[in-house]
Image (spheres, rainbow, N blue to C red):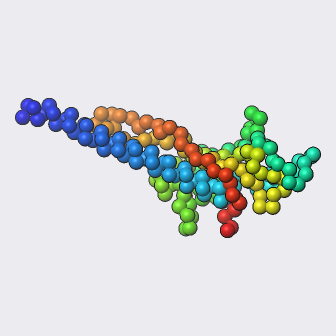
Amino acid sequence: MVEMAIVLPLLLILTLGFVDFGYAFYQWNAADKAVQMGARLASISDPIASPLSSAVATLPSGSSPGDRVLAGTYDYVCVANAAGTVSCSNCVSGTCSSVGAVAINFNLIYGGDARRPGMAAFLPTLQKSQMKVEYVATGLDYWTRPGGPVPTVKVSIVNHPFQFFFLGGLLGFANITMPDMHSTVTGEDLSTTY
């Protein structure tokens, strides 16, 4: 009885620790799949940053139709706050300015629609405030392209916690923050009408 009283708590903690860390590994894989699917969905959906639709349609002075859009021409970063309000900014050359955001397009990447699952389908504990979508001009585009701009799209999950059920209750382990995860793809036609 004495030996059992000594060994059982250690065995229980060890077993439940394996379960918790296995679940953390599952959450890691789910987050990885969520950013992959989010990036794919963002690359084929209407852009969140409203100026992006016309980003390469208007020629800047000194440019001709068909000239390459230089890397760094735009860098739209779209996020949501804890209340779910979506905002975008354009950060070029270290200066950021607020631009229009289309919340329905952000929500599509987060939650999906009847045809395609969103990021939350793969990682149900994901909050909108833990998601970031970035559209960057990387030099793959040209001015007045008929199909619209071709940005590089980066979707990230930031500040998402691993959840420990057993170790948190038994040993008081606090949830730890998962390292930021991201996936980057080249934008396609940036339109949900296909």
Task: Check the image and report above or below for 117 versus 14.
Answer: below
Q: Residue furthest left?
A: 1
Q: Could you tell me residue 180's position as x and y percent?
A: 53, 39
Q: Look at the image and tell me whether residue 30 can be seen.
A: yes
- Residue 163 falls in which quadrant of the image? top left
**Residue at image location 52% in from the left, 52% down from the top:** 34
**Residue at image location 55% in from the left, 52% down from the top:** 36
Q: Which image quarter holds the N terminus? A: top left
44 horizontally vs 68: left or right: left
Q: Which image quarter holds the C terminus? A: bottom right
Q: Could you tell me residue 127's position as x and y percent?
A: 52, 48
**Residue at image location 8% in from the left, 31% down from the top:** 2
- Residue 145 falls in which quadrant of the image? bottom right
Q: Could you tell me residue 139's position as x and y percent?
A: 76, 46
Q: Look at the image and tell me whether residue 80 can be seen.
A: no
The foreground one among 187 and 93 is 187
175 horizontally vs 136: left or right: left
- Residue 57 falls in which quadrant of the image? bottom right
Q: How many marks?
A: 0
**Residue at image location 25% in from the left, 37% down from the top:** 14
The foreground one among 11 and 88 is 11
Q: Could you tell me residue 11's position as x and y percent?
A: 20, 37
